[in-house]
Image (cartoon, grey):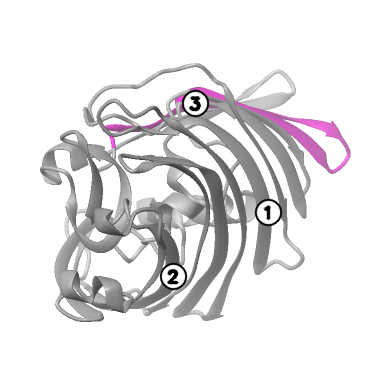
Amino acid sequence: MASRSLSAGRLTLRSMVSAEPWTVRGCGYPNLLATGEVCDGDSIHDRQHPHDLFMELTATYDRPLTRGVRWEVYGGPAGEPALGLPGFPHRLSAMANPIAPIAHHWLDSTHVSFGVVTTGVYTSRWKLEASAFNGREPDADRTDIDLAPLDSFSARLSIAPTTHLVVQASAGRLREAEEGIGTLPRSDVTRVTASGAYYRSLSTRRTWATTVAMGINAGDEFTPAGVFAATTGAGLIESTLAVNGTHTYFGRLEFAQKPADDLHAHEYGVQVFTVAKVQGGYTYSFRPWNGFRSSVGVTASASFVPHELAARYEGRIAPGVGVFVNLQPSGRATDALEAEAARLNRMR
């Protein structure tokens, strides 16, 4: 990120890239009940797809309008429209958790959109913004930029009733959002979301962040069995507690309504299943060394499915475990990252 004064305002350039096109191989890492996007000619299920190389390439211009009110315009070939809460990799309540939510495609899947323009006005307590963007999901080539017409639209209102709480409500119409399988056409999606994010320091050594969110998708589902109208919902509550800069505890509870076709239970036709997942984990951070801080973590989960799907998951409760490592800048660089994450949670 680079920022400087320009005329009566401020210009900010932002870029963000991901190594996941090379570190997450195939159609994604194992993640029971996760669905969304297409790989190798079929829809992805029980895996989380890798992020694209270019996650953000944007510019923002911000300037005062009147006393206490500012105007902002934001856009670029890769960025985040005014729809939903901040993406899961950037939420303070989820930054220690490397696993994507199964509710991702109901809440924050547009956090990487290839083509977006957003404008809005805001104060220290509220922000109102609207976007025109490319709502199509990226293709299986994770190293390119999949530009397309900016024919999707959204609006979002964020309010901070206290210094510790931000709530948002947003809605959008995503044109040709989901890729069809084989010769099936793309489908449009209407999405509505609402969320609340709470963050505070419990002491000089403890910080706590929690997010509660709900999302609804409505649109036509194109399947080999035919086309049908589907309205589905998903929600989550997630929380992170950081202690002494060394110990971090995180957890997530979520549910999602998923069409049988998304879970590859094609024999159930147009039926929609309600699935759920609970996950928790712990991260231990070592002392900084040569400007970097490393950490190791563990996570465990339980996925809950209805009896119709029990045979596919060897029971109605399917366990999962994981081990991970993390490397990040230490000292002032880490402080800057945390401050920026807090700004995003406040303003988005």
* Residue 200 position by quadrant: bottom right
**Mark 2: which secondary structure?**
strand
How far is the residue under mark 3 from the one under mark 1?
Answer: 20 Å
Q: Earlier in the sequence, mark 3 or mark 1?
A: 3
**Mark 3: which secondary structure?**
loop
x and y percent of residue 343 in the render?
57, 52
The disc placed on residue 255 is 2
Does the CB distance between marks 1 and 2 fall below 8 Å? no
Tell me what residue is drawn at x 41 percent, y 29 percent. 186
For residue 240, above or below residue 333 = below
Quadrant where the image shows the N terminus: top left
Q: Which residues are magenta?
A: 52-77
Q: Is residue 305 left or right of residue 85?
A: left
Q: Earlier in the sequence, mark 1 or mark 2?
A: 1
Tell me what residue is drawn at x 19 percent, y 79 percent. 319
Q: Is residue 38 left or right of residue 103?
A: left
x and y percent of residue 25 in the render?
11, 44
Report if residue 192 is visible in the image.
Answer: yes
x and y percent of residue 205 in the render?
44, 80
Tell me what residue is drawn at x 75 percent, y 23 percent. 8
The disc placed on residue 134 is 3
How far is the residue under mark 3 from the one under mark 2?
Answer: 27 Å
Q: Amino acid at mark 2?
A: Phe
**Mark 1: which secondary structure?**
strand
Q: Is residue 167 left or right of residue 271?
A: right
Viewer-nearest residue: 157 or 59: 157
Mark 3 surroundings within 10 Å by alpha-carbon count, few (fewer than 14), some (14 through 19), many (20 or more): many
Viewer-nearest residue: 181 or 104: 181
Mark 1 surroundings within 10 Å by alpha-carbon count, few (fewer than 14), some (14 through 19), many (20 or more): many
For residue 161, above or below residue 185 = below
